[in-house]
Image: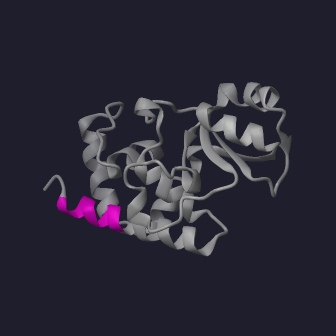
């Protein structure tokens, strides 16, 4: 249900859930705050951190669904009032492709690495290759950067307030 919630909050229809599940989810989201939503979506992916050379960081962007501070080209990015300069990359990848990407880009596991790959087994939410906007916001709330964390939390609060006014 994590991806259905994030897709719904992003203004899209999670077509893979039944109408009854969608209704239940909408009611549940109306009672949530940003922290509860972040907890609900904890299982959306397994996060792996790496380090790699600058060329790998640059080229890897084309092979992942950018999220968090790397989603600077998302149409809603300006709402966050964050700078668009990032040195690393944060993105979703299909779990089945993680090992191949790590090998191809010669990535080295590093708990403090600037490359964050979020391996997911659920690909239906990535319409057009991009991460749903609510996923970008949730991922920002996990940032150690205070401004990014605060911006993500604020955006989740805004998205949850929006669900109160939709579908009624």
* 43 to the left or right of 126: right
Q: Position of residue 107 (x, y in %)?
A: 82, 38
* 117 to the left or right of 111: left
Give the residues in magenta. Answer: 158-165
Q: Position of residue 80 (x, y in %)?
A: 43, 65
Residue closer to the observer: 31 or 64: 64
Q: Position of residue 137 (x, y in %)?
A: 47, 58
Q: Position of residue 157 (x, y in %)?
A: 38, 68
- Colour scheme shown: one colour
Can residue 120 be seen here? The reply is no
Can residue 105 be seen here? The reply is yes
Q: Residue at x 33, y 61 (%)?
A: 159
In the image, is residue 99 above or below residue 137?
above
Determine the main secondary structure of the stretch shown in magenta. Answer: helix
Residue extending furthest left? 168
Q: Would you identify the image quadrant in which residue 55 lies?
A: top right
Q: Would you identify the image quadrant in which residue 104 lies?
A: top right
Residue 83 falls within the magenta-colored stretch: no
Q: Residue at x 76, y 28 (%)?
A: 99
Residue closer to the observer: 146 or 58: 58
**Screen quadrant of the C terminus:** bottom left
In the image, is residue 11 above or below residue 38?
above
Q: Residue at x 58, y 51 (%)?
A: 70
Residue closer to the observer: 150 or 25: 150
Q: How many marks?
A: 0
**Screen quadrant of the N terminus:** top left
Residue closer to the observer: 82 or 47: 82
Q: Residue at x 53, y 65 (%)?
A: 83
Residue 160 falls within the magenta-colored stretch: yes
């Amino acid at each position: 249900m994590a991806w259905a919630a994030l897709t719904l909050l992003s203004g899209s229809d999670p077509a893979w859930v039944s109408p009854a599940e969608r209704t239940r989810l909408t009611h549940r989201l109306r009672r949530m705050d940003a922290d509860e939503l972040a907890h609900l979506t904890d299982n959306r992916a397994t996060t792996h951190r790496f380090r790699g050379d600058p060329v790998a960081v640059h080229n890897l962007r084309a092979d992942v669904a950018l999220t968090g501070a790397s989603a600077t080209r998302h149409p809603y990015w300006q709402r966050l009032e964050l700078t668009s300069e990032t040195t690393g990359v944060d993105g979703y990848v299909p779990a089945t492709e993680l090992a191949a990407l790590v090998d191809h880009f010669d990535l080295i596991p590093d708990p403090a690495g600037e490359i964050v790959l979020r391996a997911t087994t659920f690909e239906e939410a990535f319409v057009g290759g991009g991460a749903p906007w609510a996923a970008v916001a949730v991922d920002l709330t996990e940032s150690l950067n205070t401004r990014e964390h605060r911006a993500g939390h604020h955006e989740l609060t805004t998205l949850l307030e929006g669900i109160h006014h939709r579908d009624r």
